[in-house]
Image: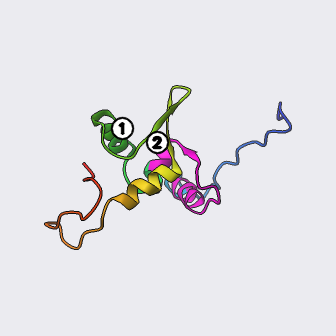
Amino acid sequence: MNANPSRPRPVPPPDNQSPRDADVAAAERLAHSYLSDVALTPKEAALLLGFKVKSLANWRTAGRGPPFRKINGQVRYMRSSLEAWVNEHAERRSTSERPQTGRPLN
């Protein structure tokens, strides 16, 4: 029985859905969220950006990558900051081309 009736229980993925499919579904929900400035966990941020969680951790240690915050001692990425970070990295047409604006990814 649910000890706190006002708090809904988490719904597990269907039996035929793998954990990876559940991660993809979570990323899709994040991508279509109407909330533009949500604090995301490193796993959610990695799913949204298409990077590995370990890459984000390495970039944090090196002082690179998207900006993050520590909230109650836990790393969180603001969705608006992630979008701004992606947008400030210019698209390239060739690997030898230098970005026109923004700073390099690494």
Residue 60 sits in quarter: top left
Front in this rendered view, residue 52 or 98:
98
**Residue 47 spot, x, y in % from top left:** 46, 53
Left of 67 or right of it: where is 35?
right
* Snapshot quadrant of residue 98: bottom left
Marks 2 and 1 in Cβ contact (< 8 Å): yes
N-term-proximal mark, 2 vs 1: 2
- Residue type at numbered disc 2: Pro
Q: Residue furthest front?
A: 101
3D distance between C-alphas at marks 2 and 1: 8 Å
Q: Secondary structure at mark 2?
A: helix
Residue segment shown in magenta: 22-45
Give the image location of residue 56, x and y in percent. Answer: 36, 43
Q: Which residue is mark 1?
A: 57
Residue extending farthest to the left is 96
The kind of residue tagged 1 is: Ala
Name the residue at 23% across, 63% down. Answer: 99
Element at label 1: helix
Q: Which image quarter holds the N terminus?
A: top right
**Residue under the point 57% across and 55% down:** 26
Identify the mark at residue 42; answer none if there is no mark. 2
